[in-house]
Amino acid sequence: MIRRLLFAAIFACGPALAAQAQESGLITLETRQDSQGWEAVGRLDIRGKGFCTAALIRDRLILTAAHCLYDIDGTLIAPDRFAFQAGLRDGQAQTTRFVTRTVAHPDYVHTGEATNAREVAIDIAVLELDRPIRNTRMRPYRIAQRPIRGDQVGVVSYGRGRENAASLQQVCDVLGRQTGVIVMTCDVEYGSSGSPVFMMNDGETRIASVVSAMAHVNGQKVALGTSLEGPLNALLSHFATLGPARPGGTQRLLNSDERNDTGAKFVRP
């Protein structure tokens, strides 16, 4: 699942579009050698709904987009409908885990509005797995500092038409950042929501953003992601205050004016 937004009005990216570096195309991670280093990215299956993409950030926590937690009627999806297929390729996962609890950013309010930049800026969630993943080939990713305009990033994602193996785009460009939303030229599709966006830091691959939506800027298709630095710290701090997962497993802080009866802007892959 991924949302498509019309976002051109709030970014002035014209000069950046003309000055982009050479981008790389998508590479399907079909073999063990291709997948080396990316095994901790997986397809997040949602029974009866479709799928998103997620990545391991703790041995028992995966990171994805918050809007993936919502059904098409705007209600929260029960955790037992999620399954994380780590390192999925050729339809076979290297490791499968089920989800016991889902926790969205404490300030995230799911409105389903297609132009809500503030929603995109905190569109992240962590999902607690039923068992830890402890595998030398599936090490949790660390978090990078937020990317800025002109940086080059990469993305690993699943998507419509390529759901049985992850695809890697090694190089795409950061066009700009505004109100916590990162605009990138990365090639994403329906199903790519929650995909980790990577940067290299001192020779280590780290997650710099999470894909939230597709958009068009000056007629060009782009990907929109969350700037993780502040929002992820707030999310993990909130998660740390929660007790053991309660029955049903979904824990959120609801604002008094929040409504969950609006339709989410999802497209089933």
Image (spheres, rainbow, N blue to C red):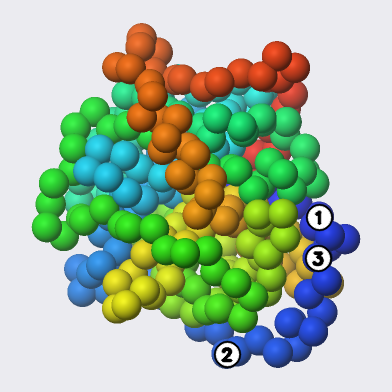
Q: Is 268 placed left or right of 43 in the picture?
A: right
Quadrant in the picture for residue 128: top left
Give the side of residue 236 with respect to residue 61, left or right.
right
Q: Which mark is residue 22?
A: 2
Measured along the vertical axis of the image, is residue 202 above or below residue 187? below
Q: Which mark is residue 19?
A: none
Give the residue drawn at x 68%, y 64%.
Answer: 177
Give coordinates of residue 208: x percent, y percent. 47, 62
Foreground mark, 3 or 1? Answer: 3
**Given the current orientation, which residue lies at the most extreme right position?**
9
Q: Mark 3: which secondary structure? A: loop
Q: Mark 2 or mark 3: name the one nearer the start of the chain.
A: 3
Q: Disc 3 marks which amino acid?
A: Phe
Q: CA distance from mark 2 to mark 3?
A: 22 Å
- Circle 2: residue type: Gln
Q: In this figure, which residue is indicated by the disc labeled 3? A: 11
Q: How much space separates mark 3 and mark 1, taking CA atoms?
A: 11 Å
Q: Is residue 269 visible?
A: no
Residue at left 36%, top 74%?
Answer: 201
Residue 224, percent from left and from top = 64, 58
Q: Earlier in the sequence, mark 2 or mark 1?
A: 1
Q: Helix or strand or loop: what does disc 2 sit on?
A: loop
Q: Above or below — where is 171 with respect to 94?
A: below
Q: Which mark is residue 6?
A: 1
Q: Position of residue 231 (x, y in %)?
A: 54, 45
Could you classify mark 3 by the number of other residues whose Cα lies within 10 Å: few (under 14), some (14-19), or many (20 or more)? some
Label 1 sits on what residue type?
Leu
